[in-house]
Amino acid sequence: MIPRVVRAGAISVFACLLIPVVADRAMPAPTPEQERSAAAEADRPDAGGLDEAQRLFDEGRYAEAESLARELLAEVEGASGGDSLETADVLDLLVTALRSAGKAKETETRSLAERAVKIKEDLLGPDHPATAKSLHNLVWVLHDNADYSGAEELNDRALAIRESV
């Protein structure tokens, strides 16, 4: 039986031809490390919620994304602490939602963006790619507040981090 091709292209055809062969073989059992990693990911306070908030943002539903991000922030801070990477990730999404909703000039937006940068600098270092993402969010907040020199300085720093990777 030949599987139905869903997408056109060489990769899709190639993948469809491999499916029957792979399906007949037993998959190896996950290693204990893979099982722990999967369990940790499933137990993360923001598992699924951050993806849902991102989906709302991508659909242009900024108020809903903001509301969900605020709920997630409270949940993550309670479970992981106020200075965890999970907290910084939620802060990044919240800042993006606030900015897109026209709230970049609110004091809270800037302080949340600065907080995300500080958390990542403290935990990952000033030259980590994840720090660059938070720096980039802060750049846009500064730009929207007409702090062009501050935005330019941080943008140069974020760009240097990304180019070094």
Image (spheres, rainbow, N blue to C red):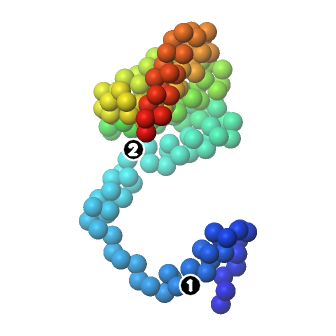
**Residue 146's spot in the image, x, y percent?**
61, 9
The vertical placement of 57 against 106, above or below, is: below
Q: Which mark is residue 45?
A: 2
Classify the position of the N terminus by image quarter.
bottom right
**Residue 155's spot in the image, x, y percent?**
52, 22
Viewer-nearest residue: 74 or 150? 150
At x 29% / y 68%, what residue is drawn? 31
**In screen coordinates, is 113 left or right of 6?**
left
Q: Report helix, strand or loop for mark 1.
A: helix
**Residue lying furthest front:** 164
Looking at the rendered structure, the kind of residue marked 2 is: Pro
Q: Which residue is mark 1?
A: 20
Q: Report helix, strand or loop for mark 2.
A: loop
**Residue 38's spot in the image, x, y percent?**
36, 58
At x 59% / y 35%, what residue is drawn? 65
The vertical placement of 18 against 70, above or below, is: below
Viewer-nearest residue: 65 or 129? 129
At x 67% / y 86%, what residue is drawn? 2
